[in-house]
Structures are given as structure tokens and as C-alpha cells.
Image: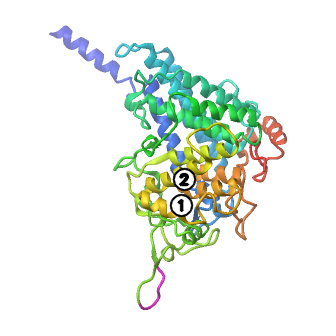
């Protein structure tokens, strides 16, 4: 008994030297979960230090502090924050997760197809994350970026990176095997559903291919058609959407709830640019996107949808607010949805790509209907809206870029980054910078200040290569 107690005491003393809050080993699966959640955090949050795309796309505007609505990216070092978040908390963790899983021996599920699925899924989310940085900045550190022994990585050409990412996506899709499992609950987007990841990957390739359609139409067409013909299919209903469902209690609540409700702040309201447009169109999504406000000073109440003046100071109480459904703790975050897939197919049909599934009009109608139903409308709402000559594909004004670009901007509400990207690609709707804006509407983020000071030579070379480190410098894919 004395010997046993002595051994037990020694073990306990040794345990005192172990910091249980700083583990020596972290599983690849937990790193993947953290990276996935961090990616959604960055894409969903309306925190003005990180994500101002709803403002740039003029879906929302500010109330008291209007710097970001006037395209001040510097005071809050927004480009630095986005750059650092994506590299450090998303891409680097995904890279490390892949390395750990590749070298881990699984006793509970030793089938090599399961590990292969895990690695392919990590690769798909990695491609998504890299594509976001390229679409934001242009040329970026890529081939040398994850080497911790190289503190001054070179910048790679944006188009070269983008094509390489599509090639990586091709390989990852080939390595997915829906007959086997993957990451299970470590994957908060699809809960390890490999078939769902295959649809997401094909839809991502479709999106990326279409983005190159004006700069390299041959490469773009091939990427798009590989996505459409792949046996795994595309995101084909709202149930396939790439989403993260938040929880009812912090710290895992919807970031919009965190910033608009839990913070007690009243910084954002819908912008008149969007609200006025939807009012003119009698858009059925108005009550699904916004609240009404009473504009009567005397007599009977007059409830209307009223957006704040974009770029100006606005009284929070005098205008419509973001709809209640967006502000609940459990409201989901999206990075890809069915409506977007159908808009991409409509564009592909117009460009003469073999996308199947009907005409550009058919895909356009599917996209508009999918958006209305996702937000809580009905088939009847969609049918009536699409019967309006201003909305109907055959009679809506302008060329296909205007038709698709305009409706896509409406459907990408609350997905500010993609709304900004599609506006840059289509140049529709026609948006105007506010009178006090520091610049025209940005078409890219400037490089981080930290890169200018710490990686100066490579920064200077990259800036020269893209035509100047300005918010007005169009990126390689933005040809018109």
C-alpha cells in the first residue's frame, strides 16, 4: 500500500508540471473545426474592423461613424486584419490540419478512403480560402507563404495562383469517395457528408471558372463544364447550401447577433441604395430582409421600408432595420447557396458554355425563386415577381450582364463579399460613391501596411506588377 501511494504521489507531482490549458498535441480534426469556424466568422461578421463588404456593396450603411461607408479602409487597418485573419487563423490551420491527419494512424477507422476524404475536404476549404484572398488583393504570397522559415515571402501572380487553385480543386474532387465517411462532427458545415462536399467543390469550381471567363475563356469554359458534368453534381437545392448553423449561447452565436444585438450598439441600417431599389420593384423579399418604420408624425401610422442615406450619418430610429430573423443567435452563415449556382449557370448559358438544365432564362428563374424561398417567401411570390416585365428575363432592361448582375446583387443580400465581387465582374447595378467618399468604390483592398514595412521589396514588386497598390486598380479577372 505504501509503494502504491508513493507511486501515485509521484505521478501527481509530475502532472503538476503539465499545463492542461496549453496541450502539446492538437488533432488535425480540431484544427480543421477551428479554421472552418474562423472562416465563417470572417465572412459573416459585420464588425467594421474585419468585414465591410456589405457596406462596399451598398446593402447596408452606417449611422454615427461613417468612415467605412465612405471607403476609409486605413484607419481601422481593415486590409491588414482580413489578410492576417485568413492567413493565420484559416489557411495556416488548414495546412497544419492536413499535415497532422496525413501522418496520423487511425485505430477506430483505419480505412484509407476515410483519411483520403478528410484530406480532400481540407483541400477544398483551403482552395476556397486562397481564392478569397486573390479576389480581394490580386497578387499575394502563395508558393512561399506557409514556410515559417521564410519571413519575407515573394508574391505570386494572381492569375497563375487562381488557375493552380482550380487544378488543386480538380484533384481534390477526384479524391472524394461518398461511399465512405470523413470528418463527422468536426466538420460543422456538412457534418462530414462527403457527397455534399463534392457538390460544394463542383460549385466552387463553377464560380472560379466563371470568374475567369473574360480573361481566359478557353480555360474558364473547360473548368465550368467539368463542374457541370461531374457525376457528383452541383449545389442543386437550398438543402445543399454551404452553411454554418450557430448556437443559442455565446461564444458560438451568429456574428450578426453579436454585433447588432449583444453589443448593444446601433451602428448599421439597410442602405437606401438597396431598399429604394426593392421598393420600386415590389420585391417580395422586403419584409424578409428589413423591418418597417413608422414615418407618420401625426395621424394614422404609416409603415414603410426606408433605407438610410448611404455614406451619411443616419438616425437609427428613423429608418428600417435589419430583419429580426438575421438578428437571432442561431441564424446561419452562408458561403455558397443554390441561388448563386443557378445564376452562374445562367451566365454560362449566355456565354455559350455547355451547362445543361435549360436556357439562361430557366436558370435565372430558378435562381430568383431559390432566393425568395430561402428567405421565407413562396413559389407564388416568386412566380408573381418573375411575371413583372422589369424582372422577367425576356423583358428586363439591358443585356444579360445587367439582368443577371442586378438580380444577383439582390439575392446576395447579407453575403457582402460575393455581392461586391459580382458587382465588380458585371458592373451592375450601377452604384455611385457617396459625396464624401475618399475614393471611387473600391475594386480591391490595398495591401496591408505591415507588408509595406516588413516585406517592402516584395510588396513593391507586387504593387508594380498589378498596376499600383490602389483601391481603384482592377484585378486580373476584372476586365471591363
Direction left: furthest residue = 1
At a point 60% along the width and 22% down the height, the residue shown is 171
The residue beneath circle 2 is 365
| Residue 263 on image: x %, y % | 44, 59
In this rendered view, identify the residue nearer to me: 208 or 57: 208
Q: Residues within 10 Å of mark 1 (few under 14, many from 20)?
A: some
Whether residue 295 is in magenta: the answer is: yes
Calculate the distance from the C-alpha at mark 1 to the C-alpha at mark 2.
Answer: 7 Å
Numbered tag placed on residue 386 in the rendering: 1
**Disc 1 + disc 2, Cβ < 8 Å:** yes
Mark 1 lies on a secondary structure that is: helix
The answer to whether 262 appears left or right of 223 in the picture is left
Q: Is residue 245 visible?
A: yes
| Residue 373 on image: x %, y % | 44, 54
The correct choice, above or below, for 389 with respect to 468 in the image is below
**First-in-chain label (1 vs 2):** 2
Corner quadrant of residue 227? top right
Corner quadrant of residue 166? top right
Instruction: State the predominant SS element of the stretch in magenta.
Output: loop
Location of the N terminus by quadrant is: top left
In this rendered view, identify the residue nearer to me: 66 or 279: 279
At a point 58% along the width and 56% down the height, the residue shown is 48
User: Which segment is the magenta one?
Assistant: 294-299
Amino acid at each position: 500500500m505504501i509503494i502504491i501511494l508513493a507511486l501515485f504521489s509521484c505521478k501527481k507531482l509530475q502532472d503538476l508540471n503539465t499545463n492542461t490549458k496549453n496541450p502539446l498535441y492538437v488533432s488535425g480534426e480540431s484544427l480543421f473545426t477551428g479554421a472552418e469556424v474562423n472562416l465563417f466568422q470572417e465572412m459573416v461578421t459585420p464588425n467594421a474592423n474585419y468585414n465591410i463588404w456589405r457596406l462596399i456593396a451598398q446593402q447596408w450603411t452606417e449611422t454615427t461613424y461613417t468612415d467605412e461607408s465612405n471607403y476609409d479602409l486605413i484607419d481601422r487597418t481593415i486590409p491588414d486584419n482580413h489578410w492576417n485573419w485568413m492567413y493565420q487563423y484559416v489557411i495556416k490551420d488548414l495546412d497544419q490540419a492536413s499535415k497532422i491527419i496525413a501522418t496520423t494512424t487511425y485505430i477506430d477507422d483505419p480505412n484509407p478512403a476515410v483519411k483520403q476524404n478528410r484530406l480532400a475536404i481540407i483541400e477544398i476549404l483551403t482552395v476556397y480560402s486562397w481564392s478569397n484572398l486573390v479576389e480581394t488583393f490580386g497578387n499575394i504570397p502563395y508558393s512561399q507563404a506557409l514556410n515559417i522559415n521564410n519571413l519575407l515571402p515573394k508574391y505570386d501572380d494572381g492569375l497563375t495562383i487562381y488557375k493552380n487553385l482550380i487544378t488543386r480543386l480538380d484533384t481534390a474532387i477526384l479524391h472524394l469517395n461518398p461511399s465512405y465517411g470523413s470528418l463527422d462532427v468536426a466538420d460543422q458545415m456538412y457534418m462530414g457528408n462527403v457527397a455534399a462536399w463534392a457538390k460544394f467543390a463542383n460549385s466552387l469550381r463553377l464560380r472560379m471558372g466563371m470568374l475567369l471567363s473574360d480573361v481566359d475563356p478557353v480555360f474558364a469554359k473547360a473548368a465550368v463544364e467539368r463542374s457541370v458534368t461531374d457525376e457528383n453534381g452541383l449545389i442543386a437545392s437550398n438543402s445543399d447550401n454551404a452553411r454554418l448553423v450557430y448556437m443559442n449561447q455565446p461564444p458560438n452565436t451568429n456574428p450578426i447577433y453579436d454585433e447588432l444585438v449583444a453589443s448593444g450598439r446601433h451602428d448599421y441600417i439597410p442602405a437606401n441604395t438597396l431598399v429604394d431599389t426593392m421598393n420600386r420593384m415590389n420585391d417580395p423579399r422586403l419584409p424578409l430582409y428589413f423591418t418597417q418604420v413608422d414615418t407618420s408624425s401625426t395621424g394614422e401610422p404609416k409603415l414603410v421600408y426606408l433605407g438610410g442615406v448611404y455614406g451619411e450619418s443616419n438616425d437609427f430610429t428613423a429608418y428600417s432595420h435589419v430583419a429580426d430573423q438575421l438578428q437571432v443567435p442561431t441564424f446561419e452563415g452562408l458561403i455558397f447557396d443554390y441561388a448563386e449556382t443557378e445564376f452562374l449557370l445562367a451566365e454560362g448559358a449566355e456565354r455559350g458554355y455547355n451547362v445543361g438544365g435549360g436556357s439562361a432564362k430557366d436558370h435565372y428563374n430558378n435562381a430568383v425563386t431559390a432566393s425568395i424561398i430561402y428567405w421565407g417567401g413562396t413559389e407564388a411570390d416568386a412566380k408573381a415577381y418573375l411575371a413583372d416585365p422589369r424582372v422577367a428575363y425576356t423583358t428586363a432592361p439591358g443585356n444579360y450582364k445587367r439582368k443577371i448582375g442586378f438580380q444577383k446583387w439582390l439575392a446576395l443580400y447579407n453575403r457582402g463579399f460575393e455581392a461586391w465581387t459580382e458587382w465588380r465582374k458585371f458592373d451592375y447595378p450601377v452604384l455611385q460613391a457617396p459625396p464624401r467618399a475618399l475614393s471611387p468604390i473600391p475594386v480591391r483592398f490595398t495591401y496591408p501596411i505591415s507588408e509595406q514595412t516588413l516585406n517592402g521589396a516584395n510588396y513593391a514588386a507586387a504593387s508594380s506588377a498589378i498596376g499600383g497598390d490602389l483601391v481603384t486598380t482592377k484585378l486580373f479577372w476584372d476586365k471591363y
